[in-house]
Amino acid sequence: MDFRSWMSAVQARTESALQRLLPAATAAPSRLHAAMRYSALGGGKRVRPLLCHAAGAVFGADAERLDIPACAVELIHVYSLVHDDLPCMDDDVLRRGKPTCHVEYDEATALLVGDALQALAFQVLAEHGGSAAMLATLAQAAGSRGMAGGQAIDLAAVGKALTLAELEFMHIHKTGALIRAAVALGAQTGGADGESQRRLGQFAARAGLLFQVVDDILDAEASTATLGKTAGKDAAQNKPTYVSLLGIGRAKEMAAELRTEAKSALADFGARAERLAQLTDYITERSF
Amino acid sequence: MDFRSWMSAVQARTESALQRLLPAATAAPSRLHAAMRYSALGGGKRVRPLLCHAAGAVFGADAERLDIPACAVELIHVYSLVHDDLPCMDDDVLRRGKPTCHVEYDEATALLVGDALQALAFQVLAEHGGSAAMLATLAQAAGSRGMAGGQAIDLAAVGKALTLAELEFMHIHKTGALIRAAVALGAQTGGADGESQRRLGQFAARAGLLFQVVDDILDAEASTATLGKTAGKDAAQNKPTYVSLLGIGRAKEMAAELRTEAKSALADFGARAERLAQLTDYITERSF
């Protein structure tokens, strides 16, 4: 299967699995369930599920088994977007080409949607064969020393002049933690040994930063219509980005370097890591 | 050990375990970690940890092992209080005798505190011997078909005339789900069989409603100083309560009936359920 077909297939099966795992909009409380489905379904590139499936493929894990950790990670990601868009955070009105959850519903509902999606992520993993170690991986990535901590570092950074090292520290938490978890959960599903996990961790660390550098480039260069979310937001909110720190040219060079480093970390896996390598190229080329 | 001494001992060991399980306020991001500790430590009656320890004691579980599920449930409870107090929800300024988290810190930090405390609850359980079944119990109780769903039902009920059955449906989710989880996790830690779990579930369902009826009586009768949170809030917000539906006299009768039913469900356990029976009395007598 060529890469584009594989990607479409994983995106489709992720959508289908989420459809099944999310409570029906007819089940009480129906407004909450409708809002959860509104936020989680029908959009997004599903980068984290793609990484989870690609990492599982290295160890020959079945796609059927990978759907669960892939959806668990995506549910955590979606909850973080819903909360991040709230007025007390980024106060954004557009996400994945649609009004944000608190605009379409209301703030209190959006708060509960995020809360319930986070619980659902752990429930899905716990009810469908996830081990305690996998649940710990996901919880660490979501928590105060992972993604939620990254959001807090981001809040504290608004309007400040960060060094490149401080910006990297923020992103290692804010987006990096969950991307590393997506890869780790795929590998855990495939029964990867400790050394393989360690090498994939190196890949995921570089891929996570790459993803953020590309996101910053896109935020600076692309239109709101193309992105499906408000473009130019970082500059407007005076948030430090790789582009604001390095300029667009140096940011693109950095993306190219991170791509090389990420793919180097895959070398020992040979052809088994083909999907991870292709995903790395895909993530990079979004910005060129 | 008499009941009061046992209760103090469980409260003290819960505080001590939470102290240990929460990230240090000196660890980055320090403001988030300080706010998490501010919200979770030094207050609260620890009713859910008490129920967890009392249920575990029925099956002879060690207090050391019960600290983990007790703290996991309490972390979920504390996160729900922090989010519930936010301006877009109940907009409250006082909790456990202190300014609420968003007043002491800020709204964005309080949002992240709740998010991170929820993740920490699952992390604590996953990292310290909790089984996938226990993690599923906690996640179901926290999610859209449990506590978060109950909040959504509560939101939809403001200003409406509920029937007693509708009010009960709300509380079975909003406070009942986590109280049932506290009991179930204690029993699971003690290796309870299915039949024992079922009977304890019947106890927990009555105890959960009892707790809510008593809470409504206290909200109507006690002072803000006594409660450590804003009194008379339900009436001021035009929220349906057992007192507004039944009147104070009938609400107290209902509490007495629920106490009897809860304790009947414990009959087969004999003296092993002593702490659960004492807790039932304690919860009831708070209101008389």
Image (cartoon, coloured by chain):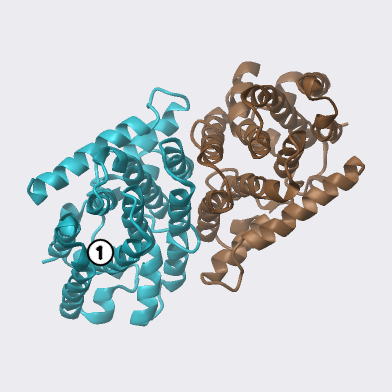
Chain colours: A cyan, B brown
Q: Of B259 and A106, which appears nearest the observer?
A: B259
Q: Residue at x 30, y 32 (%)?
A: A19
Amino acid on which the number 1 mark rests in the picture? Phe
Mark 1 surroundings: few (<14), some (14-19) or many (≥20) residues within 10 A: many
Question: Badge 1 sits on which subunit?
Answer: A
* Residue B186 at x, y percent in the picture: 68, 38
Q: Of B154 and A71, which appears nearest the observer?
A: A71
Q: Is residue A206 left or right of residue B209?
A: left
Q: Quadrant of residue A127?
A: top left
* Residue A285 at x, y percent in the picture: 12, 63
Tell me if residue B238 can be seen. no
Q: Residue at x 43, y 65 (%)?
A: A150
In the rendered image, the quadrant that contains the N terminus of chain B is top right
Considering only vertical position in the picture, is B89 above or below B102?
A: above
Considering only vertical position in the picture, is B124 above or below A201?
A: above
Q: Residue at x 81, y 20 (%)?
A: B267
Q: Residue at x 21, y 66 (%)?
A: A268
Q: Of B17 and B176, which appears nearest the observer?
A: B17
Q: Residue furthest left?
A: A2
Q: Is residue A131 left or right of residue B53?
A: left
Q: Identify the residue under disc 1.
A: A211
* Residue B148 at x, y percent in the picture: 53, 37
In the rendered image, the quadrant that contains the C terminus of chain B is top right
Q: Quadrant of residue A14?
A: top left
Q: Is residue B195 left or right of residue A38?
A: right
Secondary structure, mark 1, is helix
